[in-house]
Image (cartoon, rainbow, N blue to C red):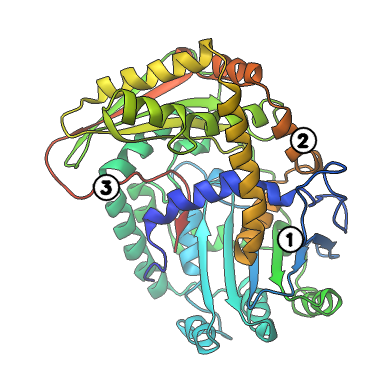
Amino acid sequence: MTDRFPRQARPAFQLFFRLVLPIFLLFSGNQAHATTPPTAGSPLSLALKPHLHHFKNGLTLVTVNDPYSPTLTFQIWYRVGSRNEHRGRTGISHFNEHMMFTGTKKFPHGKLDTLINGVGGQLNAFTDYDFTAYFENVAPDRIDLPLAIESDRMTHLLLSPDQVERERNIVLEERRNDYDDPTQKLVEKVYATAYAVHPYHNPVIGWEKDIQHTTRRDILNYYRAHYMPNNATIVVVGPVDEETLVKKIRSYFGSIPRGRLAKVRIPAEPPQHHLRMTVVRKPAMLPITMMAFHTPNFRSRDAMALVVLAQVLSGGRTSLLYQDMIYRHPVAVDAEGSYDPLTADPGLFYFYAQGLPKTSPPLLRKRLDAVIKKVKTTPVSLDLLESAKKQILTQFVMNQESAFGMGMLLGMMSADRVPMSYLTHYVRNIQAVTAGDVMRVARRYLRKTNETVGYLFPTGPLRRPTFSHPGRIVR
């Protein structure tokens, strides 16, 4: 099907996830009700509180009653993404996501779009490393429509051979577009170089040869192995009558039996002990240098300091990267970094810079190295540190306004099984990060022996400069 969102929407999604996650400070993965505010007397609090429900078949429901929202978002998140794929069948999570729109007996191909558009709603889906999610945004009185759709296609997908081949061609075209995009190719090669054994080595869309060889039987087995109530979380945000909604969920999903989840061993990535490099030479508007470092996820005590470090380095025009590479030593048109603690397994803290037309990637690397060296050897100023914290916590307040965004983040948190301690202490832990902590984690993780460098050398003009972040594919 035609994408409803452009692939280049990924940077906005990632920035949104990285900065907005504090809205979950009251969400508990172990209780049926929201927790108390994070710290007594804190000016930061949630007006809307998530509530958690468990059903006998293993299905989880998270609700947030937002009486002022004009629409309701219904989302279902499956704990399966490219992280769960086997060698030779990469991209099958995304392929399966495409097939989820090709029809059941109750909702033949094309019917979903007709029904949702007919009530003025929206539907779509996305695949990531750690999860696959589907959503419908509808008027509150139309909640039964997404309930009927998602409960039906959880178990009754037809997977007709003709539709499999049709979607294969669409996915292959997406894959070729990725290959033709020089920046996406660079990101792909950096991840494939940084990860030797972990599935994060593979692009979410999969390798072309694997997409070509994936069979209908492969998809059917994958669907049956992962699409079941005990591997799913439903998130509903909007004007919600919680008691009525729980009854409806039980009515639509309660009869679907709990499935048997196979134990899948995800190989741990061994420590990196030497610098790795990769080079892309393709038509492009501008040269790019990307530098990536292995870092822990939310389970580490260093996560909050890394969040602040990312903001100090790349939080807008006052950040260290922007000040150095755009203003003081003008070699780039853009310079940013990113760290996402909310991943199932340890991820990458990466930087990238798009150079001026005649700037070489090695020169960009030299400037990036200079900024990294500075943050490792000199404590950041108190003004910059406090500014970075305020930016993070301002986003915490501002992004409570989006029902859809809140739903997406609640789903992601549930899919990655984030513990309550991370959520309830987030504000306090961000506020507690010191300049010494920032310097310490920079020294610990931004090491040459832990680094992967990627260069994009333009071989001719192509199109306007972009940077395609890794991960999510939107249908």
User: Of circles 3 and 1, which is in front?
Assistant: 3
Instruction: Find residue 259 and name its label.
Output: 1
Circle 1 SS class = loop
Report the residue marked by disc 2: 428
Q: Position of residue 105 (x, y in %)?
A: 56, 84
Answer with the quarter of the image where residue 358 lies: top left
Question: CA separation, marks 3 and 2?
Answer: 41 Å
Q: Position of residue 309 (x, y in %)?
A: 56, 28
Amino acid type, mark 1: Gly
Residue located at (55% from left, 43% from top): 83
Quarter of the picture holding the C terminus: bottom left
Q: Is residue 411 left or right of residue 447?
A: right
User: Of circles 3 and 2, which is in front?
Assistant: 2
Which of the two residues, 153 or 448, is positioned nearer the viewer here? 448
Mark toward the start of the polypeptide (2 vs 1): 1
Q: Position of residue 403 (x, y in %)?
A: 64, 66
Q: Is residue 56 left or right of residue 368?
A: right
Circle 2 SS class = helix
Which of the two residues, 438 or 217, is positioned nearer the viewer here? 438
Q: Residue furthest left?
A: 460
Answer with the quarter of the image where residue 60 lies: bottom right
Report the residue marked by disc 3: 181
Q: Position of residue 256 (x, y in %)?
A: 75, 72
Mark toward the start of the polypeptide (3 vs 1): 3
